[in-house]
Amino acid sequence: MKYKQLGNSGLIVSELCLGTMTFGQGEHFGFQSTIDEKKAAELVDSAIDNGINFFDTADGYGNGQSEIILGKVLNKKRKDVLITTKLSFRTGEQAFNAGVNSKHIIEQCHNSLKNLQTDYLDVLLLHNDDPITPIDETLKALENLVQQGKVRYIGFSNYQAWKAAAMTQRQKDLHYSPFVASQMHYSILNREVERETIPMSLHYGIGMMVWSPLSSGFLTGKYTRDNPTPKDSRLNNFDLGLFDRELGYTVIDKLTEIAKRHNTTVTAISLSWLLTKKVVSSVIIGVSKTEQLKENLACQEIQLNEKEISEIDELTKLEPKYPATFINLQDPVLLNAKTK
């Protein structure tokens, strides 16, 4: 296993992070969790044995069961690993049981600590923005948790770049602990974060934890034009509509070609491509079987060359949109003088 710095922090995380959205029995925004405690223990042990030191969960996964199961199976191994959890989605019927307001952040942090059987969280992420809470209120609640030692590092997930940037600058102004991590969707088939989020993250030193790096399983190669809905596959019932399927089939053809050169799988090539990106600190892998875990781990053995990276980049290259189009009108003398 290889390890990376998490953003501009001193925390070192494994390049692959085990996601636990599958742990528990329940539904979260249409996603069905099916992994019981016994199976979860097998996956966690196998992950640790293969060098993974980073585990991702959220207060709503499996209707709260994900955190509970992860806490139980880690048990005495807690000090040997890093845990990140997330909050903001609704956890109760009362109007205030959601969002990134001070009440919800503090209460859910304490609840997560209890569920995970720990007295601190390595990384706490805001799972989503809310439409009403002032930035200063959110940041003050997070800073209080950090000062109390209940949270070591903080970050955000699924935020618009302008809002994350505004919050990060405000943290600097107030001398608060800064965001060092984001958790965003990024894959060969969806590169929208390259427009604004990645440039902003590199500027502020925020490391990205990538969720759904395989586009809900499409980039495993099992979805084809001839078999668009393979049996018991996640996308059949949980499709967030994050990519163009027709383009996806073309991408799979090219990735299959590259995979053959390396005697590996489309899965491994897809993950390896992400790990070449400077902003990526860790890629979250969600698996339900140890065999799938091993297939994901194979990406660690691959070294894509510059030509192959460029070939993949060209497949789904984003067309610049205003105001990015004005980059082409920047002074050529200044552009040529820029240090690469």
Image (cartoon, rainbow, N blue to C red):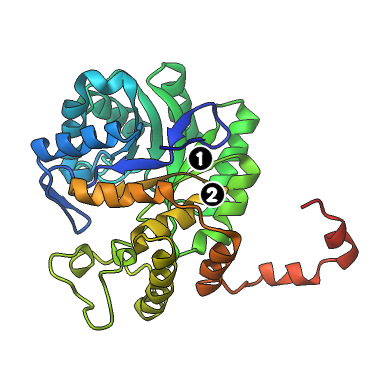
How busy is the neighbourhood of tag 2: few (under 14 within 10 Å), some, or many (20 plus)? Answer: few
> At numbered mark 2, what does the secondary structure look like: helix, strand or loop?
helix
Task: Give the residue pinned by disc 2.
Answer: 163
How busy is the neighbourhood of tag 1: few (under 14 within 10 Å), some, or many (20 plus)? Answer: some
Q: Amino acid at mark 2?
A: Lys
Nearest-to-viewer mark from 1 and 2: 2
> At numbered mark 1, what does the secondary structure look like: helix, strand or loop?
helix
Q: Earlier in the sequence, mark 1 or mark 2?
A: 1
Image: 224 above or below 209: below
Residue 188 place in picture, x, y as percent: 45, 64
Spatial distance from mark 1 to mark 2, Cα to Cα? 9 Å
Q: In percent of the image, x 46 and y 18: which residue is there?
A: 147
Image: 190 above or below 200: below
Could you tell me if residue 306 is visible in this image? yes
Task: Give the residue pinned by disc 1.
Answer: 135
Q: Amino acid at mark 1?
A: Ile
Residue 120 place in picture, x, y as percent: 34, 21
Residue 301 place in picture, x, y as percent: 42, 48
Which of the two residues, 65 or 277, is positioned nearer the viewer here?
A: 277
